[in-house]
Image (tube, grey):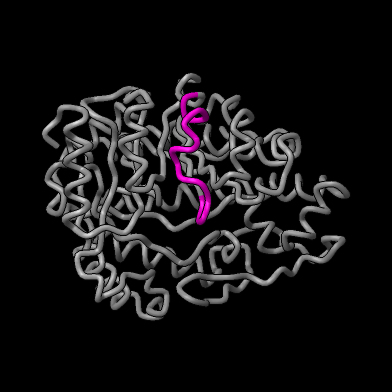
Amino acid sequence: MDIKAETCISPEKRQQWARQLTEIGQQPLALCPDLPRIAQRFEAWWAHDCLDRPVFIASTNRNPARPITKRLEMLHDPRQWLAEKVCDMQQMHRVGDALPFVRVDIGPVFMTALAGAPPKFVSDTTWYDPVINDDWSNAPDWTFHDDNLWQILLRELLVLTAVDARGKYLVCSPNLGGTDEVLLNLRGSAQLCMDVIDQPEKIKAAVRAIHPEWARMSALLYDTVLGQGAGLIHWQQLWSNQPYTQPSSDFNALLSPRHFKDLFMPDIEARARAAGRASFHLDGPDAARHIDVLLECEALDVIQFTPGDGAAPARTYTEMFRKVQARGKSLLIAAGKADVLPLCEALSPKGLAFLVGDAFTVEELDALFARFCRFYGTAG
């Protein structure tokens, strides 16, 4: 399956965004005076190197009595939504390379809503009803229409947040989702598994149709936020002086490596080439079996691994991480507090980053970061 990335986001557009991002990354932010140094550390990491220590991203809620949520119930009032999101950001205690941001979050796999499916808001997230018939005769045309109410809301929230963020903090993008995740929402897991065997051409046609719409929405994110003078990051919280993307594939946990490579890797590779940089989100032990297929993709710069809820801890995958580093790709490991130092001992600091997600008190997080810095002989 051939998807031509160069027809979706031009090199000239990437260069424009890179100039804007580089300029933003060279200036301190009101809520992050160290952004220039953090940006340098991230740039070394993207280059599979190490400036002074690995990247360390971690934060914790200073006031657990006031829970921090996506604030989806406030989307009907964008200004009140933004006010609460800014309070949430200011309530976070950040260490290391964690960046201050407000995320324009409208629930996971937002491309499903952009394709015309109505989201259901339940328990601080969104869900979608599978609607595509077995013969796919009622599948959407996969065009993300400008008059879609969810796209209109996205544009409004992006502008509102970027104007407020300029010079103070960063804007974080919504989760657009992987192409297979959109199909999973609209077809259902059992039905889509059968389609992999019985009618893969339906899947391939949808993948080809969705890709340019993803590229258009990615361009919308960068053009809108950078156009207001604010910096843009994505949910993995990575700074980059160049545009990047975070391809993912929740459905690959149910696929063989052959089917994953045939049906969805062309889109993943095209996204990576279109954006210029890419960090693939590898989610859980069932997805980990695809590591060799992913490592074959030269366009992927980073493997971001999440062990998954209730699964073995990240340090269990040390040999896989060593394989990733041996292939010249950088790592972003979603690590628990007990994982960090053992993985520091086991892995090269070059191209190594941690996204530490355990619940911490402020004191516990500061203590872990201090031990991390002592390990590498740095002050912070």
| Quadrant including the N terminus | top right
Tell me if residue 76 comes above or below residue 194 in the rendering: below
Q: x and y percent of residue 110 in the render?
A: 53, 61
* Relative to 104, 147 lies left or right: right
| Quadrant including the C terminus | top left
Instruction: Write the start and end of the magenta stretch as one range.
Output: 308-322
Q: x and y percent of residue 194 in the render?
A: 83, 54
Q: x and y percent of residue 177 in the render?
A: 55, 53
For the residue pair 253 and 360, the one nearer the viewer reads as 360
Residue occupying the point 57% across, 76% down:
120
For the residue pair 59 and 40, the one nearer the viewer reads as 59
**Main secondary structure type of the part rendered in magenta:** helix
For the residue pair 318 and 226, the one nearer the viewer reads as 318
Tell me if residue 181 comes above or below residue 275 in the rendering: below
Tell me if residue 147 comes above or below residue 204 in the rendering: below
For the residue pair 120 and 78, the one nearer the viewer reads as 120
Q: Is residue 321 magenta?
A: yes
Q: x and y percent of residue 52 in the render?
A: 21, 26
Say whether residue 66 is visible: yes
Q: Is residue 58 magenta?
A: no
Residue occupying the point 70% across, 49% down:
254
Image mark count:
0
* Relative to 201, 68 lies left or right: left
Residue occupying the point 30% across, 60% down:
102
Residue occupying the point 34% across, 75% down:
78
Say whether residue 222 is visible: no
Residue 184 location, quadrant? bottom right
